[in-house]
């Protein structure tokens, strides 16, 4: 009798198991894994398939709080991430597309505490077109973003920022049609038992001053953004964010940070990148100026540090992967320091508004590779550009860009050192770019180009420019508004411009 009961029990279990929801493909790998614990709330969600997957344009990804079944997150794939950049008609914006009414994010989890306007552009006209929007760095204006990015066999899901909490258990559902494979064997996730995970019980201690970012989840945070969100604004104490080698595909924006070191494990091993540009995340429609004190309305950079002071970046690569007007790094503030950082952009690679010191950095761009108001001191840096290496817009209030022992490599036939052009009728008569002991390769004979407007106080100076063979550069055809400095006549001037403190107004701790 006992034997028959046991057989009956096994049969019932087999029937139940056959009816129980289970993954549609055993080769699917989830991150965080189903049943994972100690997950960082800033985690991205990843699904890796045995073959290539395709992103659909319908269906919803939902995240629920286990136990209460409270809907925490909803990503609707029928909403495009941004305009179709291959279609000019899709990217033209008219004033009628915007409204003075503030954009209200549909998810109620964003409270007034973390959406208070942080800058004048927080009061700007909002984009009310139907694009995916997320709030980054607790800044009111929404950024357009990609809810799913597919790389090779892995689909990465990006929840809206700061919705997941510590000490919670969540489960994920995915509608059919969100993702598909060649064999069409992934029909989504309908069960609450297929993909569940628990977050860490609590955040790092308030006394923690060294934070670890690791894309695999083994650190304090999975993302650079998560770590920067944790650090209080205008901290008087020094924080260090150590970023382990890894691929960090994320749109980074933070502001009002001070006394923070962001240190990568290695320059080529830590890659922070995102597909962003002026079309995908345009300026607010009613804020055209770039001259707001203490803020900046641009949203097009892959990595932006706004109104920040005494930051130090070391040993990492920062890149935008979209063509167009798109900085890899946009930094605003004072006394900021970059060492051994590789910056890759399109159009403008680096925009720096406020004093910044760069040492042993590499900067790659397509033209106007360095943009900004200065002052900037570049020591032993390497630059690549297809057009002008810089468009410097400093006023008489500070110096411009000074390059000492740097190398400029022109790509193609249009490279010049700098240009000074009027911008919407506004000129830059105090523009300053000074090269001392620099190597120049494939630069147009005139050296400097695109000069217009008032140039009465222009400083386009060179001293001891050399070819890659170490020979003096032929400067006989240099632009007449530029100047070759002489060791005999300009010795004091050369010594001054070789001194970072003279250029920046402060002494970097090298």
Image: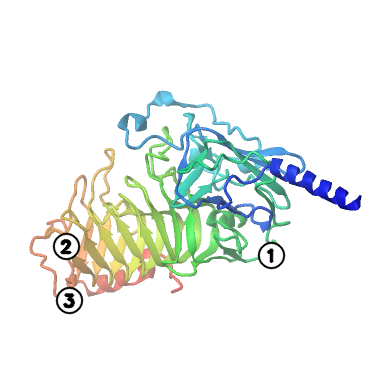
Tell me: residue 254, above or below residue 91.
below
For discs 1 and 2, the disc positioned in front in the rendered view: 2
Dot 1 lies on which element? loop
Q: Which residue lies under the disc numbered 2?
A: 442
- Left or right side of 478 for 97: right
Crowding at label 2, few (<14), some or many (≥20) Cα neighbours within 10 Å? some
Q: Pick whichever, 384 or 424, lies toward us.
A: 384
Asked if residue 232 shows in the view, the reply is: no
Across and down, in percent, residue 148 comes to 50, 44
Q: Reading the chain from its start, which is encountered first: label 3 or label 2?
A: 2
- Left or right side of 182 for 345: left
Across and down, in percent, residue 456 comes to 21, 51
Across and down, in percent, residue 235 comes to 60, 60
Residue 412 in which image quadrant: bottom left
Q: Reading the chain from its start, which is encountered first: label 1 or label 2?
A: 1
For marks 3 and 1, give the CA distance.
Answer: 52 Å
Asked if residue 365 shows in the view, the reply is: yes
Judged from this view, the residue extending furthest toward the right is 1
Residue occupying image coordinates x 13% and y 69%:
473
Q: Pick whichever, 353 or 380, lies toward us.
A: 380
Across and down, in percent, residue 190 comes to 64, 38
Residue occupying image coordinates x 50% and y 56%:
308
Label of residue 470 in the image: 3
Dot 3 lies on which element? loop
Crowding at label 3, few (<14), some or many (≥20) Cα neighbours within 10 Å? few
Judged from this view, the residue extending furthest toward the top is 96
Label of residue 207 in the image: 1
For marks 3 and 2, give the CA distance.
Answer: 14 Å
């Amino acid at each position: 009798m006992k034997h028959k009961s046991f057989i009956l029990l096994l049969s019932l279990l087999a029937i139940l198991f056959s009816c129980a929801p289970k993954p549609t493909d055993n080769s699917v790998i989830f991150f965080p894994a189903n049943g994972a614990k100690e997950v960082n709330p800033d985690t991205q969600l990843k699904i890796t398939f045995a073959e290539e997957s395709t992103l659909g344009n319908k269906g919803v990804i939902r995240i629920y709080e286990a136990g209460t079944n409270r809907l925490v997150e909803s990503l609707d794939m029928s909403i495009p991430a941004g305009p179709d950049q291959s279609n000019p008609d899709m990217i033209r914006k008219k004033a009628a597309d915007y409204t003075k009414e503030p954009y209200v994010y549909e998810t109620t989890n964003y409270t007034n505490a973390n959406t208070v306007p942080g800058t004048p552009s927080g009061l700007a006209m909002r984009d009310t077109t139907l694009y995916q929007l997320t709030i980054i760095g607790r800044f009111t204006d929404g950024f357009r973003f990609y809810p799913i990015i597919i790389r090779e066999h892995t689909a990465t899901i990006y929840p809206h920022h700061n919705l997941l909490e510590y000490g919670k258990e969540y489960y994920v559902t995915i509608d059919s049609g969100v993702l598909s494979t060649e064999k069409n064997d992934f029909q989504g996730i309908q069960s609450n038992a297929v993909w569940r995970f628990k977050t860490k019980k609590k955040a790092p201690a308030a006394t923690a001053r060294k934070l670890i970012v690791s894309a695999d989840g083994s650190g304090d945070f999975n993302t650079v953004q998560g770590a920067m969100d944790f650090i209080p604004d205008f901290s008087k104490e020094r924080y260090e964010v150590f970023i382990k080698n890894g691929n960090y595909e994320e749109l980074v924006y933070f502001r009002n940070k001070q006394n923070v070191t962001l240190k990568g494990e290695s320059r080529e091993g830590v890659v922070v990148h995102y597909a962003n540009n002026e079309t995908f995340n345009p300026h607010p429609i009613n804020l055209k100026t770039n001259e707001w004190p203490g803020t900046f309305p641009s949203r097009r950079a892959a990595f932006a540090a706004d109104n920040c002071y005494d930051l130090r970046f070391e040993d990492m690569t920062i890149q935008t992967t979209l063509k167009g007007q798109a900085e890899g790094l946009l930094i605003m503030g004072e006394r900021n320091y970059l060492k051994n950082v590789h910056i890759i952009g399109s159009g403008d690679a680096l925009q720096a508004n406020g004093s910044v010191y760069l040492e042993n950095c590499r900067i790659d761009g397509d033209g106007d590779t360095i943009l900004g108001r200065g002052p900037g001191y570049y020591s032993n840096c390497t630059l690549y550009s297809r057009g002008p290496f810089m468009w410097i817009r400093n006023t008489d209030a500070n110096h411009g860009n000074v390059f000492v022992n740097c190398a400029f490599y022109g790509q193609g036939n249009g490279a010049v050192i700098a240009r000074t052009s009027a911008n919407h009728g506004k000129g830059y008569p105090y523009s300053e770019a000074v090269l001392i002991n620099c190597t120049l390769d494939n630069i147009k004979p005139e050296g400097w180009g695109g000069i217009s407007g008032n140039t009465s106080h222009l400083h386009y100076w060179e001293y001891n420019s050399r070819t890659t063979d170490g020979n003096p550069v032929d400067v006989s055809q240099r632009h007449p508004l530029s100047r070759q400095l002489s060791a005999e006549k300009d010795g004091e001037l050369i010594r001054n411009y070789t001194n970072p403190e003279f250029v920046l107004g402060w002494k970097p701790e090298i």
